[in-house]
Amino acid sequence: MTTPQTLADAGQLARSIEDTVSTILVGQQQVVREVLLALISNGHVLLEGVPGLGKTLLVRTLSHCLQIDFARIQFTPDLMPTDVTGHAMFDQKTEQFRIRKGPAFTQLLLADEINRASAKTQSALLEVMQERQITIEGKCFPLTPPFMVLATQNPLDQEGTYPLPEAELDRFLFKIMIDYPIIEQEARIVRMVLDGTISDSLNVSSLSTLCDAEGVLALQHFATTVSLDEGVIDYALRLVRSTRDQNGLSRGAGPRASIALCTAGRAQALMEGRDFVIPDDIKCVARPVLRHRIQLSADSEIEGQTVESLLNRMLDQVPAPRQ
């Protein structure tokens, strides 16, 4: 378990983590790649998919391989903000107030079914996600880096849910769609559970650890050293700005999307073993960066169009710079 010393070492470590996690999360290689890109970019992820596709297993596996702290919060309608962040409580023995830290004081936070909690509780994550700190009774507590929120929501069961406000959605670097595996992959999953390779209790202690928090911080540092040409930055800007006048959209992406494309593009280049970003890196991360930052118009929804189809059309329309 070593900390990468060069950009090449960092790329090799990132690919090793991807391969190890993919052995457990069968059939979700793209999901694993995108979660790792978000982690290396020091961003947060919104995972959308039906129950039982391995979202919790993914986070547990990642936490074990990276030797970083993990906490899970099950969001429910009666969950209060202090249940997430913590609160001050009176200790009768010492006759003084002390701080009880909530589950958000961790490094890898799984916010399960985040849209089941009220907007008041959801907003408790805003400071945590943006500033990496928690304020309790006027006192700020910085979180131990690296810190990442992985929030999940079910796209089908919308009864009794509270849609995430735009301000919170914009703080997620990626929105990742997790879908059913194909039949061969599902058969492999069943066999892995039956022969004990994967435990029903999501026990992943048998996996080897690849790095620690220091290694993750090194990955994040080396990603910031990846070269980003002005032409590639201009391409990212044109992609984002094209969403603001795209037919079929009532809302386009803001400046955070432009920043996200560039930072995630650097992480993609690092994982591919390059020290510079190419236009294809930006294309690779465009969908998870943009899909939660744009909104279909009413006419587009009536016509049966989807966010994915409009993004595909936009990526075809906006010319990439020549390399």
Image: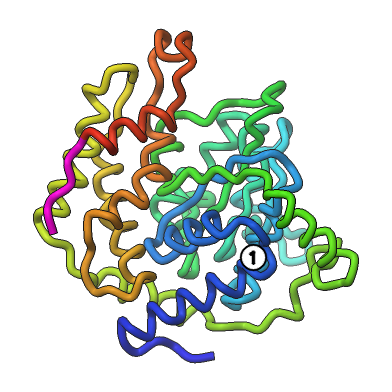
Q: Which residue is mark 1?
A: 70
Judge left or right: residue 80 versus residue 279: right
Would residue 240 be visible to someone looking at this image?
yes
What residue is drawn where x is 68% and y is 44%? 180
Q: Residue at x 64, y 65 (%)?
A: 70
At 33% from the left edge and 83% from the top edge, which residue is drawn? 8
Check disc 1 and give the amino acid type.
Answer: Phe
- The spot of residue 126 in percent (x, y) is 46, 43
Q: Residue furthest right?
A: 194
Q: Which residues are magenta?
A: 318-323
- Image quadrant in which the N terminus is located: bottom right
Question: Would residue 148 be found to the left or right of residue 315 on screen?
Answer: right
Residue 232 % position (x, y): 16, 54
Q: What's the residue at 47%, 68% (across, down)?
A: 146
Q: How many marks?
A: 1
Q: Position of residue 259 (x, y in %)?
A: 26, 49
Is residue 240 positioned above or below 133 on the image?
A: above
User: Was residue 92 drawn as part of the magenta stretch in this picture?
Assistant: no
Location of residue 142 (image quadrant): bottom left
In what element is the residue under mark 1? strand
